[in-house]
Image: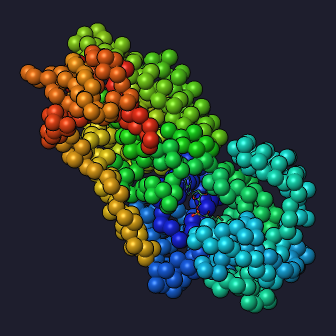
Amino acid sequence: MKYYLTTPIYYVNAAPHIGHTYTTIVADLIRRFKTMQGFEAVLTTGTDEHGQKVERSARAAGKTPEEFTTIIAAEFRQQWEKLGFKIDHFQRTTSPQHHKVVQGLFKRCLDNGYIYKSAYSGQYCFFDELYVSDAKPGDPCPDCGRPTETVTEENLFFKLSAFTEKLVELHEQNPDFLQPETRRNEVLSFLRQGLNDLSISRTTIKWGIPVPGYAPHVFYVWFDALTTYMSAVDGLDLWPADLHLIGKEIVRFHAIYWPAFLMAAGLPLPKRIYAHGWLLFENDKMSKSRGNIVRATPISDVVGIDALRYFLLREIVFGQDGSFSYDALVGRYNSDLANGLGNLASRTLTMIRQYRDGAIPAPAGAPAIAEQARETIASVIAAFERFEFSKALETLWALLSAVDKYIVEQAPWKLIKKPDAAATLDATLYTAAEVVRIATALLAPVIPDSTAKIWAQLGMSEPLESVRIDRLAWGQLAGGQKIGEVAAVFPRIDAGVAIPKMQELEIAETARQAALLGKAPSPPQDLIAIDDFVKVDMRVGVVLDAQAVKGADKLLHMKVDIGEAKPRSIVAGIAEAYKPEDLVGRKVVIVANLQPRKLRGIPSEGMIVAASVEGGKPVLAGFHEDIPVGARLK
Ligand code: MSP
């Protein structure tokens, strides 16, 4: 049985970043999962290469659209290869074969009476030579801010309005067609307002697929782009797709336009659309203008692609927005992979090596763990089916914790010393190894590289990817099987080393991609290295004395003990915010290694740390918990 799934095809006017990678990781996971369920799973991704914006990006880069799109499409393809994704079809909208399928789809819609010519009015920026969709007359151009002008041209229209009822019916009767539920509700309420017909061609744009029989019309981007899902597998008997994975911002195109085009052409509809949320960077939406876009390869180069895959799938509830941060990535890796799965696997295998000469004991297991494992297999598979990845991983980690606890209780290191405890020791080791095997198989779609290593260490002969995940059962690990060589699969990551390294590579990667796009690299952010930060010696101090400074309304003169032989004399501009008597005894933060200077003739041997907003009073930095004087801030 086949399972055909797709990612969006990505625009080539930007280079791949972690947002594109996120969707593609999930697609790769589902493809692997479906394969392990016995499906012939096929994944299509690709690049969306037509339209005005691409034409302009090419021009800005001093390239023809053909040259430019070839470079960026190759960049996407190479990234996915480097990250180890199993992609079956990488479709470019500039491929002649795609053109044929788009033109064929149009022909069917035309023959069925759903296409007509009419005048189209839209807002246009003459300076940028760009249509500004959803703009009203007089609205500014989002790129240059100049007022847009209304232009009218003859376009081909698709009778979208004719499908309002059918689309409402589709979404009402098939709650699974579009998920999550929030997206389905949005689409239904949009549909209930009625649909306008849709312009699907342009005559002012050159860089597009010619509409057959209507020169000089070319297809407007979405008619062209959506058809990729079919053109990529044309003639392969894979249509309709089982799943379109998309980000939430392109739901309308997929859940309204696309089914309408297919209905008009008399072709089968995709079975399911799933729209996930946005990946934010440290709680801010990633965007080019904020300059906070992160790329995947610098991360995978330092901590491995599995660390990123695990983090994104465990940390973010699929379907909702979620945040990426380097700290959280390293934190998750260390707690769940290094200390969790990695530690369990190496500890179990090392004991089997030491106590049982590297041979798995005969099947016998702790009944409670075996039962939990059976339940875990069923619920992890069910959660994967519902795309509840974080829940699946949470359930699996509960099993890992239960085994950890069980090992500690059984204490194999004590059992080995008791001659009459051999059977108990066997059962303990078998239980732990069997959980490692089951967890490894269930995790193979999520962290394929690392699970393959653990699988080999367990001494399994069957390749991991050919394991039937739906036939996993307790007790299949063969007694007597010789384990492989044991090595740490998830070495602990030192955040202080790994994070600056990732940030450094990220800067280099940004510059490399900017050059590919023909853009001047964005000005370097004023980031400082950790070495710069540690130069600042900040200490906890206590104010021993505070006095107003004569003739200076804003200044206070303090004596602050920072744990040295003699208190420091510090002059600070905080008199408007604090009374001297309120400061005595208060713990404060002092920058201790500033060059001393004199203010109003009084020596100031450091700076007191305070925060303020523009025009506001300073607020002294302090602590909620107690901390001794002299402690250093790091
Ligand atoms: N070319 C269209 C899609 C046509 S599909 C027939 C397009 N391209 S895009 O390059 O902008 O890619 C958008 C998709 O990339 C999103 O729908 C999502 O899958 C992924 N993401 C891009 N940035 C993202 C985040 N910050 N967060 C999550 N996913 C993101 O739209």
Q: Is residue 241 left or right of residue 449?
A: right
Find residue 122 and report its image quarter.
Answer: bottom right
Front in this rendered view, residue 515 or 120: 120
Residue found at the very far left of the displayed protein:
565
Q: What kind of colouring is applied to the model shown?
A: rainbow
- Percent from the top left, x then y, of residue 185? 78, 45
Find residue 242 and report its image quarter.
Answer: bottom right
Front in this rendered view, residue 402 or 194: 194
Tell me the residue at 34%/61% (across/down): 524
Front in this rendered view, residue 480 or 101: 101
Q: From the viewer's perspective, is residue 153 above or below residue 449?
A: below
Q: Is residue 584 left or right of residue 468?
A: left
Q: Is residue 393 visible?
A: yes
Q: Is residue 236 visible?
A: no
Tell me the residue at 80%/76% (across/down): 121
- Percent from the top left, x then y, of residue 459? 34, 40
Find residue 377 and report its image quarter.
Answer: top right
- Percent from the top left, x then y, of residue 96? 62, 83
> Which quadrant of the figure contains the C terminus?
top left
Q: From the viewer's perspective, is residue 342 above or below residue 565?
A: below
Image quadrant, ligand 1: bottom right
Tell me the residue at 37%/64% (across/down): 523
Tell me the residue at 48%/26% (across/down): 399
> Which quadrant of the figure contains the N terminus?
bottom right
